[in-house]
Image: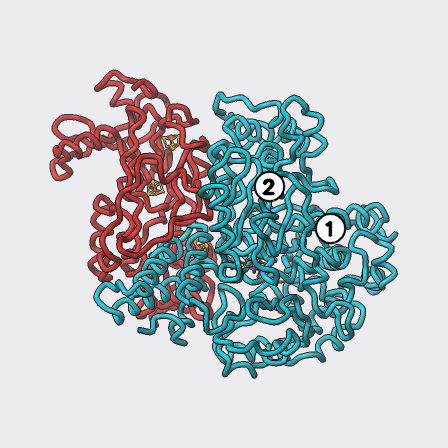
Chain colours: A red, B cyan
């Protein structure tokens, strides 16, 4: 038996997972219980510093009494809940979510966990046929809800499209975007309260977009980079990282991380400076940091670029 | 939050339209976003940057989010579009019944879909007029409102949630011909389809829900009262709310919107909630392909729905009810708005309903072209001015629904049943039908039937008996799509199934929204199934992966199978379809994804497609 500690004193409830009884505080999610028990539960749209949107469905489990599977990241435990993670149904859905995403998206920068889950669950995106041609710049954002070209099935539709580079600080590579809503949440009520980006369009044609897909410098964006900080797929990344990757000089193995405190103002945000080849390539903050919860402002996130190069946002 | 708005200015006409519809609340009123966008569409035919910025400024909504909302709905356009657009149904009930021919004729006369500056046409999913295929919905900006020099005219015409005339000059044509469509696009008045014609049983005996269709004048409160109208509300006020909720529970009234949930359970939960603020919502977004019963009820007997909502609202303790009517239903919207205004004028709505001291009033909101907004939580998001994305449940709407408050949401037909239950008592209602399937049920018959239309029969009537009412079992019947695109196919050897929740479940089918769409053996089922798969791909909100990507892969695999272009052979493609089916059914957030494979699955099982 394990016990999840969430820090505050709350009533404990009893949950059975794969025949093992666990006690967890009221308000914990099923995923909290699974994590505490050491299970490797896949997740894409969940983040400890964001409100659950339970959109990706890769974390699903069986809960007794529920016909559909249940997202473990969002569902709170209840006393007497009976959860199963070890069934063929669970494995099938997790595999299919990973497979369907890989069939439509470029997941090559989605990290080691995603790569491992792809193999572990046996995702086979190639069985849907060869990928169709990428969309022209801006084309995906111009599709009209409720209308699409009728496919012949010879190729599989993807979200492939050119990278959007419209400012000096970060790029948006939406061919990688899995619509996990994290950037929208970080830009909105979960951190930044700027609301520069939102989901636009519908269904497979939905995109993350500014109003009328205007370039970021014309939008409300203040370049806090909090969207980059939460993006799980490399769809959003600093220009510094993007250029290195393009040039083939991106070197994560050779990267060192230095922890410091931001000196721009008195708040005291903790910064992690990611350095490659004697150059700062990214600045992050730990998501469990009590001040930042992983979120920064333009000065902390991109101040290094003001030091290292001269351009300011919007000049390009 | 300070809004950062694009520099583009709205035109005089755009501003006038928005002002007339939503005014200048001075604080965030995101819930008025759809009315504001409708007003702009109705005035000028598309939503420009300037118009969107102006709406955001008035309602205090960030422009990226407002854009996300505008682009979610098929009836809104954020790129210039002809102010008069014909939406031509090419869905399963119309395509083979003149719909595709009409598309071809319009393409010849007007060019490809979307082209044309003054008038244009586009394809559309089911328009809820399937009994009179082929169907067309005309989205026409009000002619005088286009005149930018005359903002006063715009003001007068623009839509407002409280006006009794809807905005725009929208209309329905069914059956439609290229000529009638072209004339209507030129601005000619059109007579909408008569709902009485679509009710073959109208005026006959043994009708409850349809008893007033063709009998009362839908525009005249006195006529409604003369037919017994408002006796139900009077009785409900006399016996009290607790008793009304009890009667509904005893009646065992199940929801008629498709999910068949016990209505009494929902009502009791909301009535018993300590929250002071509660809402009633009527789901009139009827968009399940093949369904048109709620349209007929609203067009032909709108006071019944208004009365039923008043009974329901007061019973559960709501002071405000919202009626969310499908955007493609201008005649129904007009009828309901008129009935609401009349009822208000005569004290049947307002601060003191029928002198009882109880307050209840209604707001009518227009949908904007999104099947998913029929899903109850998506509908609530849409009412709140958000993208129509379903919410996670729990919490259920009875706990946290519209604006986060306890909410009862019911289908039109469900609500109209309430009047009879209040009048006759729960036990009488429960004595009709059996098990959980009580009362009478409306069915929407279309396709190859002799007399298509809405039919009312007691629960438990067999499919064969129902077809007899509509002129007999169609000769050469090959399959029936039962329950809609989210339902499944049944075959002529299954006609003796009793039409109950239990009876249909026993044969692996569902009553759904009451769709009975008949196909004969000349049907190109491959085309039918590809249309259904395309429908779900178009209508997926895009929120969750199983449905967003799964509906795309289902449509592609189906295309390969019917074209004989399987990857790795038939068995492997069928396995792929089954795998996609399972993840959509098991792991999607809402009922759309969970049923998106249902029709395809049953068609394959019955050999309607995929035979070689
Ligand atoms: C994709 C989808 C579409 C739906 N469309 C409708 C609809 O158009 N009308 C309706 O009444 N219910 C619709 N429903 C069912 C509603 O979610 C909900 O169950 C219903 O409004 C509850 O009312 P009832 O209990 O009176 O049926 C839909 C459900 C789903 C999943
Ligand atoms: S950088 Fe900050 S303000 Fe700009 S889109 Fe990202 S989260 Fe929003
Ligand atoms: S850009 Fe990144 S964070 Fe935003 S939705 Fe796409 S994958 Fe998620
Ligand atoms: S199942 Fe489909 S429609 Fe429903 S929430 Fe998921 S993506 Fe949206
Ligand atoms: S991680 Fe749970 S639904 Fe995405
Ligand atoms: S109106 Fe065309 S299928 Fe329903």
Left or right relative to B506: residue A38? left
Give the residue at x 50% y 74%. B509
Mark 1 Cα-neighbour bin, 10 Å: few <14, some 14–19, many ≥20: many
- Mark 2 falls within which chain? B
Where is residue A127? Give x, y as percent.
Answer: 23, 60
Q: What kind of element bears circle 2? A: helix
Q: Quadrant of ligand 1?
A: bottom right
- Mark 1 falls within which chain? B
Disc 1 or disc 2, which is closer to the eye? 2
Give the residue at x 55% y 30%. B56
Residue A8, placed above or below residue B48 = below
The first of marks 1 and 2 along the sequence is: 2
| Nearer-the-camera pick, B259 or A136 | A136
Mark 2 Cα-neighbour bin, 10 Å: few <14, some 14–19, many ≥20: many
| Nearer-the-camera pick, B291 or B468 | B468
Residue under label 2: B185
Where is residue B304? Give x, y as percent.
Answer: 76, 59
Left or right relative to B582: residue B216? right
Residue B131, placed above or below residue B205 = above
Give the residue at x 70% y 65%. B199
Q: Compute the Cα span from label 1 to label 2.
A: 23 Å
Residue A34 in sight from this viewpoint: yes
| Nearer-the-camera pick, A171 or B476 | B476
Which label number is shown at residue B588?
none
Give the residue at x 65% y 69%. B442
Where is residue B561? Give x, y as percent.
Answer: 31, 65
Residue under label 1: B335
State which quadrant residue A22 falls in.
bottom left
Q: Quadrant location of the C terminus of chain B?
A: bottom left
Left or right relative to B354: residue B462? left
Q: What kind of element bears circle 1? A: helix
């Amino acid at each position: 038996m394990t016990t999840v500690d969430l820090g505050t004193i709350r009533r404990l409830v009893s949950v059975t997972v794969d025949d093992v009884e666990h006690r967890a505080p009221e308000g914990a999610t099923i995923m909290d219980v699974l994590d505490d028990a050491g299970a490797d539960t896949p997740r894409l749209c969940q983040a400890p510093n964001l409100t659950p949107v339970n959109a990706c469905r890769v974390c699903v489990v069986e809960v007794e009494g529920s016909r559909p599977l249940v997202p473990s990241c969002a569902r709170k435990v209840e006393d007497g809940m009976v959860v199963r993670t070890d069934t063929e149904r669970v494995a099938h859905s997790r595999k299919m979510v990973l497979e369907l995403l890989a069939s439509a998206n470029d997941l090559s920068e989605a990290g080691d966990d995603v790569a491992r889950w792809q193999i572990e669950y046996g995702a086979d995106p190639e069985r849907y046929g060869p990928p169709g041609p990428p969309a022209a710049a801006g084309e995906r954002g111009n599709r009209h809800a409720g209308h699409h070209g009728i496919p012949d099935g010879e190729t599989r539709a993807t979200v492939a499209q050119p990278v959007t580079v419209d400012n000096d600080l970060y790029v948006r590579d939406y061919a990688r975007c899995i619509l996990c809503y994290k950037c929208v949440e970080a830009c909105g009520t979960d951190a930044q309260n700027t609301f520069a980006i939102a989901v636009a369009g519908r269904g497979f044609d939905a995109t993350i977009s500014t109003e009328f897909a205007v370039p970021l410098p014309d939008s409300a964006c203040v370049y806090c980079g909090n969207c980059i900080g939460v993006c799980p797929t490399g769809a959003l990344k600093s220009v510094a990282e993007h250029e290195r990757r393009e040039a083939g000089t991106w070197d994560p193995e050779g990267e060192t991380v230095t922890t410091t405190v931001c000196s721009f103002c008195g708040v005291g945000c903790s910064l992690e400076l990611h350095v490659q080849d004697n150059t700062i390539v990214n600045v992050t903050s730990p998501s469990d940091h009590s001040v930042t919860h992983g979120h920064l402002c333009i000065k902390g996130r991109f101040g290094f670029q003001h030091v290292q190069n001269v351009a300011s946002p919007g000049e390009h | 939050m300070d809004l950062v708005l694009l520099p583009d200015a709205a035109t005089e006409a755009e501003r006038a339209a928005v002002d007339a519809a939503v005014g200048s609340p001075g604080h965030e009123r995101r819930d008025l976003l759809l009315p504001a966008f409708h007003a702009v569409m109705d005035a000028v035919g598309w939503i420009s940057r300037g118009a969107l910025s102006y709406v955001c400024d008035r309602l205090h909504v960030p422009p990226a989010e407002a854009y996300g909302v505008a682009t979610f709905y098929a009836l809104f356009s954020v790129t210039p579009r002809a102010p008069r657009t014909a939406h031509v149904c090419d869905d399963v009930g119309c395509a083979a019944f003149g719909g595709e021919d009409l598309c071809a004729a319009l393409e010849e006369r007007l060019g490809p879909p979307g082209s044309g500056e003054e008038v244009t046409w586009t394809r559309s999913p089911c328009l809820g007029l399937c009994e009179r295929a082929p169907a067309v919905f005309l989205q026409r900006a009000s002619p005088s409102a286009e005149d930018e020099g005359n903002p006063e005219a715009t003001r007068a015409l623009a839509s407002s949630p409280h006006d009794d005339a809807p905005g725009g000059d929208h209309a329905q044509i069914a059956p439609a011909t290229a000529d009638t469509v072209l004339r209507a696009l030129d601005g000619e008045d059109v007579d909408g389809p008569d709902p009485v014609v679509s009710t073959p049983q109208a005026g006959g005996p043994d009708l409850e829900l349809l008893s007033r269709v063709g009998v009362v004048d839908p525009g005249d409160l006195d006529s409604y009262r003369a037919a017994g109208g408002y006796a139900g509300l009077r009785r409900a006020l006399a016996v009290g709310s607790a008793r009304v909720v009890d009667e509904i529970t005893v009646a065992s009234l199940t929801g008629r919107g498709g999910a068949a949930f016990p209505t009494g359970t929902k009502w009791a939960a909301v009535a018993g909630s300590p929250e002071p603020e509660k809402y009633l919502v009527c789901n009139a977004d009827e968009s399940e392909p093949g369904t048109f019963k709620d349209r007929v009820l609203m067009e032909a007997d709108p006071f019944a729905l208004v009365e039923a909502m008043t009974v329901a609202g007061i019973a559960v303790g709501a002071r405000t009810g919202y009626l969310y009517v499908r955007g493609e239903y201008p005649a129904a919207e007009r009828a309901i708005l008129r009935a609401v205004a009349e009822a208000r004028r005569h004290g049947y709505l307002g601060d003191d309903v029928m002198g009882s001291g109880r307050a209840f009033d209604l707001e009518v909101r227009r949908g904007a072209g999104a099947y998913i907004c029929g899903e109850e939580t998506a509908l609530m998001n849409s009412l709140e001015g958000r993208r129509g994305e379903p919410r996670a449940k729990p919490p259920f709407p009875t706990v946290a629904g519209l604006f986060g408050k306890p909410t009862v949401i019911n289908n039109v037909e469900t609500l109209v049943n309430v009047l009879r239950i209040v009048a006759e008592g729960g036990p009488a209602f429960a004595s009709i039908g059996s098990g959980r399937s009580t009362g009478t049920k409306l069915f929407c018959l279309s396709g190859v039937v002799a007399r298509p239309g809405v039919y009312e029969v007691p629960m438990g009537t067999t499919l064969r008996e129902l077809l007899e009412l509509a002129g007999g079992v169609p000769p050469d019947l090959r399959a029936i799509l039962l329950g809609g695109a989210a339902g499944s196919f049944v075959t002529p050897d299954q006609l003796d199934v009793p039409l109950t929740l239990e009876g249909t479940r026993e044969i692996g089918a569902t009553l759904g929204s009451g769709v009975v769409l008949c196909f004969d053996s000349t049907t190109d089922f491959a085309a039918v199934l590809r249309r259904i798969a395309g429908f779900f791909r178009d209508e997926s909100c895009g929120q969750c992966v199983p449905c967003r990507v799964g509906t795309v892969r289902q449509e592609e695999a189906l295309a390969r199978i019917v074209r004989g272009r399987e990857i790795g052979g038939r068995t492997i493609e069928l396995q792929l379809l089954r795998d996609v089916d399972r993840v959509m059914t098991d792991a999607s957030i809402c009922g759309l994804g969970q049923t998106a494979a249902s029709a395809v699955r049953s068609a394959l099982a019955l050999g309607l497609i995929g035979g070689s």
